[in-house]
Image: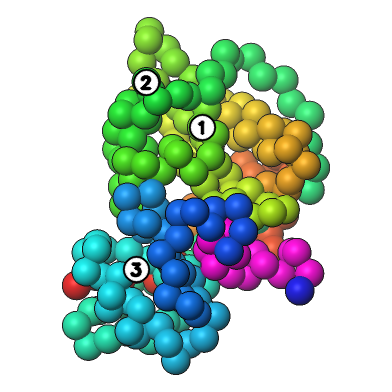
Amino acid sequence: MREIEKLDNPVWHSLSESHHSFAIDYNTVKFYQPDYCPFGGFTALGTTSAAIADYSKLVDNFFIVGEKPLLPNSLKLNKELVCLQMVATGKIDMEIKEEIVELGPEHHEELYELVRLVQPGYFKKKTPLLGRYYGIFKNNKLIAVTGERMKMNHYIEVSAVVTHPNHTGMGYAKQLTTHTVNAIFDQSKKPYLHVAETNSIAIALYKKLGFTTRREISFWNIAK
């Protein structure tokens, strides 16, 4: 399999490669431990129902990323979130004017609260342990962040591109995304990301920064 094709099933390949230590493995279905990331992926459709039923004992609400899964009768498909999967073509040549801080354990609670405010449902207490996260502070308050989530041998996902609603329009997301993308290339890996197909403002930003759309990919939200 070509490395780029692994992006068709990013959860599965992340949990098979760089993030294997975070996996709950049901053979042909793999999930992140739910306090790190509520995502799963599979390779054999006929095996998903039993694995999803087992995983649902650990968490009430989660996502399968990629193809539509088969569900047990005890669970329902809440919604399908269609995203564009975009890949960076090279380092971004843009001036960074703000001070960007790599966030440590002392920042994790503030990071969690900020992401939960803007993008609830995806970011968990231990998500910051999956990769590097970066932030911009104003008056000692964290007001914008971006970081790394799913990781494979050759690709790292840019995630949590979040700015507090009181501080939008200042170019913080652009600068943080630039910093994160270039840091991923410095690791000799390639950055990619997922953005809702309806989020035209974010899509336009990523295109300006040199991302190209690779494909559409669905996040299937499953609930009890």
The local secondary structure at tag 3 comes to strand
Name the spot of residue 39 as percent of width and height, x first: 42, 62
222 horizontally vs 173: left or right: left
Is the residue under label 1 in contact with that under label 2 (CB below 8 Å)? no
Which residue has dot 1 on it?
A: 133
Tell me the residue at 47%/24% (across/down). Answer: 103
Which residue has dot 3 on it?
A: 221
Name the spot of residue 43 as percent of width and height, x first: 55, 80
Tell me the residue at 22%/88% (across/down). Answer: 73
Q: Which residues are magenta?
A: 2-15
171 horizontally vs 124: left or right: right
Which residue has dot 2 on it?
A: 106
Between the C-alphas of marks 2 and 3, the distance is: 31 Å
Q: Look at label 2 and name its amino acid.
A: Glu
Which quadrant would residue 23 be assigned to in this image? bottom left
Dot in front, 3 or 1: 1
Q: Is residue 146 above or below residue 158?
A: above
Name the spot of residue 224 as percent of width and height, x first: 19, 72
Residue 4 inside the magenta-drawn segment: yes
Specify few, some or many for label 1: CA neighbours under 10 Å numbering under 14, 14-19, or 20 or more: many
View extreme (top): residue: 139
Specify few, some or many for label 3: CA neighbours under 10 Å numbering under 14, 14-19, or 20 or more: some
Q: Look at label 1 and name its amino acid.
A: Tyr
| Depth order, front residue of 61/27 | 27
